[in-house]
Image (cartoon, rainbow, N blue to C red):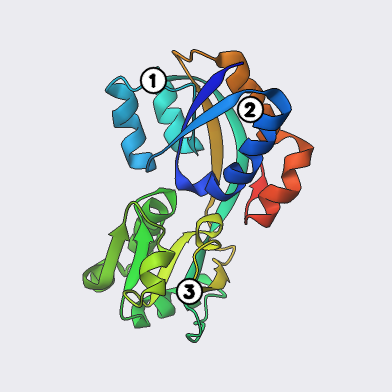
Amino acid sequence: MAEIKVMLSAAFKEAYLELVPEFERATGHRVATTWAPSVQMMKRLKDGEKVDLVILSAAALEDMMKADLVSERHDIAKCGVAMAVRAGAPKPDISSGEALKRTVLAAKSIVYSTGPSGIYLIGLFQRMGIADQIKGKVKQVQGEPAGAPVARGEAEIGFQQMCELMPVPGIDIVGPLSPDVQEITTFSAGLHSAAKEPAAARALVKSFQAPAAHPLIKKKGMEPA
């Protein structure tokens, strides 16, 4: 039986933690997991860290393919950006792009991640023409979900993928961003170019993509890809 080494970002974590034990029971394979922020993965793989599979945003995976670190891409799930406030706090209006802009300008403090949602929001706030106005009250977090500082009262509003906000205790999710400003991120699995266990890694990916996994993926705030 194989040991499959997987490196992944936190976005797929909640579904992964439930799907992997089922796969291990069904196949006898063992899965060894390394968690890493997307922004660190490329460097670690370029520095020679060896894994069989990486799971992160499709855009970041494409960069790894261009660098010849990853040889195959398999889409697993997709998720939009949502906003959260501290549990019990009033829920501001984010029903449209204009409403979101007013809410962001009125907020005392804002937090988002260094991952795909944070990268998107930086561009969105620039396009809205408010990046300079909010610069002093924005904080980017790495190594914990954006909902955590909101739960502690360190930020009034927080943004991240819905699937990463849902598990955070002490927050209320206001909702997903409205369709006119929403960004859907696809999360994909990539086979490492030097994978030791390619067949077992592909079998693991297939288990994530299987119809039996779809209800769990939806329950965790994502949609099957």
* Alpha carbon distance from label 1 to label 3: 37 Å
- Mark 1 highlights which residue? 50
68 or 183: nearer the eye? 68
Query: Which amino acid, by three-letter code, is at mark 2?
Result: Leu
Residue at image point 54% right, 45% down = 12
- Callouts 1 and 3 close, C-beta under 8 Å: no
Q: Secondary structure at mark 3?
A: loop
- Callouts 2 and 3 close, C-beta under 8 Å: no
* Mark 3 Cα shell of 10 Å, populated few (<14), some (14-19), many (≥20): some
Q: Which sits earlier in the primary sequence, circle 2 or circle 3?
A: 3
* Mark 1 Cα shell of 10 Å, populated few (<14), some (14-19), many (≥20): some
Q: Where residue 90 appears, x then y in whole percent? A: 49, 87
- Mark 2 highlights which residue? 204
Query: Which amino acid, by three-letter code, is at mark 1?
Result: Lys
User: Mark on residue 170?
Assistant: 3
Residue at image point 58% right, 51% down = 79
| Horizontal arrangement in the rendering, residue 8 relative to residue 125 (left or right) | right
Q: Where residue 13 appears, x then y in whole percent? A: 53, 46
Q: Secondary structure at mark 2?
A: helix
Q: Which sits earlier in the primary sequence, circle 1 or circle 3?
A: 1
| Horizontal arrangement in the rendering, residue 224 relative to residue 57 (left or right) | right
Query: Which amino acid, by three-letter code, is at mark 3?
Result: Gly
| Horizontal arrangement in the rendering, residue 139 relative to residue 117 (left or right) | left
Q: Where residue 32 appears, x then y in whole percent? A: 49, 30
* 213 vs 106: above or below: above
* Alpha carbon distance from label 2 to label 3: 33 Å
